Image: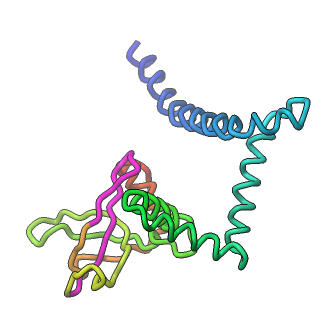
Amino acid sequence: MKKLGGFFFQGLIYLAPLGITVYVVYLVYRFLDGLMEAYVDPVIPFNIPGINFLIILLLITLLGFAGQSIIARPIKSFFIKVLGKAPLIKVIYTSIRDLLTAFVGKEKKFNKPVLVKVNNVSNLEKLGFLTQEDLSNVGVKGKKVAVYFPHSYNFSGELFIVPSEYVTPINIPSSEIMKFIVSGGVTKV
């Protein structure tokens, strides 16, 4: 009976991550597919599964393309300037924009995984990502750097300013380190 329970939990370990991933992808798909339903249904008299989702993806891609054009740059600058005048909106907008740019933009910030010695007394070390090496713009003097430490199983983390001599670069792809940290260290690198 104990062996049967072990098999059950082993099967659960295999199935749960896949099931949860499929479910989250399904929820995102349903949400995006439903966004265009009111606009597409009157135009196309018959149902094509996924057409609304594809239209959303196409519109996002076209927006990204248009945002890179010379004509759209002044419009984009105008909206950024307007958003920059509203205190709370500015913080939210710039934080989200910078975070997304850090992961998928031209200037990826989480591409330098490092190992940081926590203090001189213990052998405790943390994995993180070097995000800035020059902190003079925020008033930090000396050889200190900014290191971001993501939390396990969460979309948050902490930023520490640490002496640069405590930081050791790691020659492992950033995506592997992020997977390792987010999984709580259970994923093999």
Let me know if residue 103 is in the magenta part: no
Q: Residue at x 51, y 64 (%)?
A: 103
Placement of 128 over or under 5, stated as above or below? below
Where is residue 33 drawn, in percent x and y?
Answer: 71, 38
Q: Residue furthest left?
A: 121
Figure quadrant of the N terminus: top left
Q: Residue at x 22, y 76 (%)?
A: 166
Q: Is residue 52 left or right of residue 108?
A: right
**Residue 136, percent across and down?**
28, 85
In magenta, the rendered stretch is 142-159
| Left/right of residue 62 with respect to residue 179 in the rendered view | right
Q: Is residue 153 above or below residue 177?
A: above
Q: Position of residue 10 (x, y in %)?
A: 47, 29
Left or right of 117 on screen, residue 189: right
Report the side of 32 relative to 162 (left or right). right
Instruction: Decide: is 34 above or below 105.
Output: above
Q: Residue furthest top?
A: 1
Residue at 67% x, 69% y: name it: 67
Q: Quick one: 162 or 175, which is closer to the camera?
A: 162
Location of residue 9 (image quadrant): top left
Q: Residue furthest right?
A: 45
Within the image, what quadrant is residue 118 found in?
bottom left
Residue 130 image offset from top left, x and y in percent:
36, 73
Quadrant where the image shows the C terminus = bottom left
Count up the numbered dots: 0
Determine the residue positioned at 68% across, 64% down.
Answer: 64
